[in-house]
Amino acid sequence: MAGTLTDEVSGPEMMANLREIARWVKLSGTTEEREALGFVEGRMRDYGFRTEVILHDAFISLPGKASVLVDGKPLKAITQSFSKPSPAGGLSGVPVHVGSGSPADFAGKDLRGRILLIEGMATPATAQRAMRAGAAGHLHISHHEHIHEMCISPVWGSPGASTIGEMPNTVVCSVSHADGIAIRDALAAGKEPVVTLNAEVDTGWRKTPILVAELDAPAGGEDSFVMLSGHHDTWYFGVMDNGSANAGMMEVARLCAGRRAGWKRGLRVCFWSGHSHGRYSGSAWYADTHWDELDRRCVAHVNVDSLGGVGASVLTHAAAMAELRKLAEEAVTRHANQPYVGKRKNRRSDESFVGIGIPSMFGSISEQAKSHAAARNALGWWWHTPDDLIDKIDEANLVRDTRVLGQAVWRLLSDTVLPLDHAAMAATLREALVPLEGALSGCFDLSHLAAAAARVEEAARQVTARAGSATPAAAQRVNPALMRVSRALVPMDYAEGDRFLHPHALPLPDWAVLQPIRDLAATDAGSDAEKFAAVDARRAGNRLAFALREAEAALADALAALG
């Protein structure tokens, strides 16, 4: 059935939808965004889905006009989302060049009240370092002639009372590579160019929409669902990012709806606002507000972003959590005829559901074959610029990417036993523990965690081996057990072990729950620092031990159901 579905992906249908979506600039919370979403809602109803548009409060930052003056000479510039507005007359000073803004670039420098010159796109990490260093502002140098819109808030979703103090408080603008390098070179030559940052920005609470389109499983199916999602808001017209993904989502929904008799569970399709201008505020709000239902019923999250770009010929690195890696590999190798390497899901792409423990895959599926080393991603030079228009879409690539997406969604909808490879996930944990066991040998025992991970891995392997012969009645018991394993382990890997908070939009290590144990391994033996670190490490170990016990018990229930 998956082959039939993917063969029927229609390029003309998607391109017709995309041309309609491309008519609007879709800034979060604007009238134009609502109008464009109305078109998508109408299409989803045409395809047989019941729909709901939810309006909610979100903390949104829409950049306004920007200008950068160097000794009074104006440069082309943009304001970054969540920049602080500049004071009357602008923020002026001789900038301090801090390289690419890495921790080492900041170390040992008194940057209080200064304007920083940073090479590379504005990011939450550099904004956080600048704020903590007491800087007044920073000017970013693009890696080429195009200047990319960016959201610099590290706070995932709308800030709460506990996180509002971590929002950026610096004036942030960006200029082209040539203009920025000229400032850098002047500083290197001993000159003192005066830079003035003028930045307008509209930041505050506003109502933003979420479109939810849903179809339940047919009679006798499970009371669970697959969540397919992508953001709807855009920078400028955003035809690739994220209009093409919306078109792909609609096409997969259309084709799956026509085969609903084969579903074992339902399909919920969510179109988010606040991705670009609210640091994933829409999906974060939805996760917080629907936490209990998502915990009980959502089997997996398939996110999609920026499909079918011109020149996007590389699908080798499409991201997936370990338990969904085989599903991604199957889809990519079949429809792109490329070897699958994969990569870890990272802190982007509306990954607001990792704390709940929902396994996820994708985000972007295809990339450019060649990309500048300093680029944030390989989605094309037009990404987050006014040039993201309909001419940046290759219909054949859009069809290919949507086939990959459709095959993964169909398997999750129609497999009798959920295709979740928990053995692969447990293996990554076991591998992560190996160097720590060696580093802490004799002073901090990790053997019980390694043994538990091995038991989970073996039990999960047995479940997978027997899944093919599972009866529908057995699957009704096995699938909830597999969901319980995800709920236990995904937060340990991707959310530092906390199921109710959202980690910041900053890089997280593999098996983030282990970080206190890694920190312990890095301390000097016998020092006070080691003793302090050991307190946190013990608690992290307990958190992981409990999660592994929960996973092991769930797998035991699955094996009992399989007989």
Image: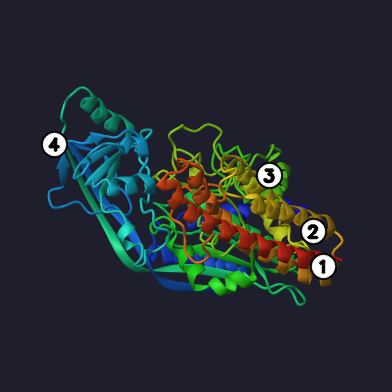
Q: Amino acid at mark 4?
A: Gly
Instruction: Indicate which label's residue lies in the foreground, 1 or 3.
Output: 1
The residue carrying mark 3 is 332
**Residue 13's spot in the image, x, y percent?**
62, 55
Q: CA distance from mark 2 to mark 4?
A: 69 Å
Is label 2 in a helix, a strand or a loop?
helix
C-alpha gap between disc 3 and disc 2: 25 Å
Q: Where is residue 113, by image quadrant?
A: top left
Callout 1 secondary element: helix
Residue 543 in the image: x percent, y percent?
56, 60
Name the residue that disc number 4 marks.
72
158 vs 316, nearest the viewer: 158
Q: Could you tell me the amino acid type at mark 3?
A: Val
Amino acid type of disc 2?
A: Val
Residue occupying the far front of the picture: 526
Distance of mark 2 from mark 1, alpha carbons? 10 Å
Return the residue at label 2: 463
Task: Tell which of 291 and 385 is nearer to you.
Answer: 291
Q: In the structure shown, which secondary structural element does the residue marked by tag 3 occupy?
A: helix
Badge 4 element: loop
Instruction: From the image, tell me which residue sits under label 1.
Output: 560
- Whichever of labels 1 and 3 marks the residue nearer the N terminus, that label is 3
